[in-house]
Image (cartoon, rainbow, N blue to C red):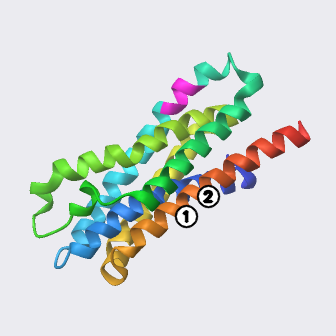
Amino acid sequence: MVAFSQFLTIGAIGISLSLDTFSVSAAAGTKSKNRSLKLAIFLGILFGAFHVIMPLAGYFAGEAARQMINNIDHWIAFGLLAYIGGKMVAESLFSKGDDKDSIGGSLSIRKEWKTYLSLAIATSIDALAIGATIAFLKLPIVESSLIIGGITAIMSFSGVYLGRFFGESLKRKAGILGGLVLVAIGLKILVEHLLFS
């Protein structure tokens, strides 16, 4: 059973991670015309599934490491979150466009599945590192992964539709917000440990 405080932490992490997939889904939505529902369901399931699997993989790698470095786990958690968050902000501020901008268009999902699969992997790499952070924080991994995956599925689904209405400007704002939230969570963990442990 996940405690309420744990749920809030996991939920915040899930929202932050899902903003990356949200931005990708929004980009697809800006170029999707007659197949928005099908695309939204597909991306929701695909991105959500990867955000369940990747934290699990990262967790079990991180759990083994945690036994050896228990005294510095708060620094590791902060470092991972700060790095991932800073990377998201930097990419959002300075990117000049990449393969994420080309998704959608007029091709069918069947023809684009390789592109979407590569995007699912790319946007879930951060979740792999978060899985290791979950191990250091001693949060329940199964519940955490399901919550993160569920939030990602919902955000990805919503992104397709919101992308149609608000256009490409959502991508950069979502990436910046997600990165700042991850950095803030890392700072909170570090400060709490230094002040109250």
- Of the pair 14 and 84, the residue shown nearer to us: 84
Labelled pair 1, 2 in contact (Cβ < 8 Å): yes
- Residue located at (57% from left, 45% from top): 144
- Residue located at (59% from left, 19% from top): 64
What is the quadrant of residue 172 in the picture? bottom left
From the image, give the main secondary structure of the stretch colored magenta.
Answer: helix
For disc 1, the neighbor class at 10 Å (few under 14, some 14 to 19, many from 20) is some
One can see residue 138 in this view: no
Residue 160 image offset from top left, x and y in percent: 32, 71
Instruction: Locate residue 178 relative to residue 68 in the image: left or right.
Output: left
| Residue farthest right in this picture | 196
Q: Is residue 60 magenta?
A: yes
Q: Amino acid at mark 2?
A: Val
One can see residue 34 in this view: yes
Q: Secondary structure at mark 1?
A: helix
Q: Secondary structure at mark 2?
A: helix
Q: Amino acid at mark 1?
A: Leu
- Residue located at (28% from left, 72% from top): 29
Q: Residue 125, labelled with which disc? A: none
Circle 1 is placed at which residue position? 177
Q: Is residue 186 magenta?
A: no
For disc 2, the neighbor class at 10 Å (few under 14, some 14 to 19, many from 20) is some
Residue 161 image offset from top left, x and y in percent: 33, 76
What is the quadrant of residue 165 in the picture? bottom left
- Residue located at (65% from left, 23% from top): 66
Instruction: For marks 1 and 2, give the CA distance.
Output: 6 Å
| Residue farthest bottom in this picture | 165
Looking at the image, how many numbered discs can be counted on the residues?
Answer: 2
Magenta segment range?
A: 58-62
Circle 2 is placed at which residue position? 181
Up-down relation of residue 131 to residue 118 (above or below): above
Residue 14 image offset from top left, x and y in percent: 54, 54
